Amino acid sequence: MLVLASESPRRAALLAQVGIVPDHILPAAIDETVRKGEAPRIHALRLATEKARAARQKWTGAPAFILAADTLVVAGRRILPKAENEAQVRACLKLLAGRRHQVMTAVALIAPDGKLRTRLALTRVSMLRLTDAQIAGYVESREGEGKAGGYAIQGRAEGFIKDISGSYSNVVGLPLALTLSLLAGAGHG
């Protein structure tokens, strides 16, 4: 049995793309505030782990694999927000335009025996220089709202990407090869 500790429809869709349909989806609401001095990698791993543990505590069904993830967009050492409004989408795109940034996703898996396994995927993304009109058009589409770094690579923003080095599915929200390897290593499937 697999429980996906995520409210992201993209994560469920990515898993379905490789033939895995979670038996249950159980979002885990946690405090995602960055701790003072916390490095992006540590932050992502901590959040994925906390989500998995919170979902495991809430889970009342039969023993299950609990899968959680957290995706960050990082420019330098700065963790960009999950854009909540037009102003945040605009600010993220202005910062990322014409620059290389990193997308990291931490994946945490708790096996039925309680053993926790974590992995981190890192993808480097280069964005084209964007005009104010391109940014305004994207902001108007509202596609970047609710997305880490204010953009969704699987949508209109793919036209802004000059180069990508690493897992495309990581940028969408779940590194599939890493996740499949983690599940297989834990005995799922």
Image (cartoon, helix red, strand yellow):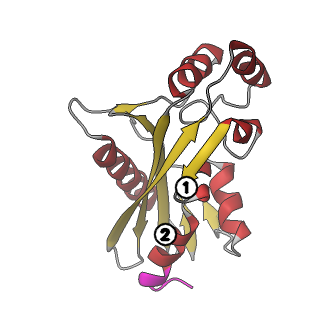
Q: Quadrant of the C terminus?
A: bottom right
> Where residue 178 is drawn, which disc sits there?
2
Left or right of residue 119: residue 81: right
Left or right of residue 18: residue 95: left
Q: Position of residue 145 (x, y in %)?
A: 65, 28
Q: Position of residue 173 (x, y in %)?
A: 57, 51
Please state which amino acid type lies under the numbered disc 1.
Asn
Q: Residue 13 versus residue 57: which sits nearer the camera? A: 13
Residue 6 visible within the image: no
Q: Residue 113 versus residue 39: which sits nearer the camera? A: 39
Q: Residue 160 versus residue 120: which sits nearer the camera? A: 160
> Where residue 170 is drawn, which disc sits there?
1
Q: Main secondary structure of the magenta part?
A: loop
Tell me, yes or no, whether the highlighted magenta stretch contains residue 66: no
| Residue beneath the point at 42% across and 83% down | 185
Q: Secondary structure at mark 1?
A: helix
| Residue beneath the point at 59% across and 47% down | 163
Q: Position of residue 141 (x, y in %)?
A: 79, 25
Circle 1/circle 2 CB separation < 8 Å:
yes
Q: Quadrant of the N terminus?
A: bottom right
Q: Which residues are magenta?
A: 184-189
Please state which amino acid type lies under the numbered disc 2.
Leu
Left or right of residue 189: residue 155: right
| Residue beneath the point at 56% across and 19% down | 94
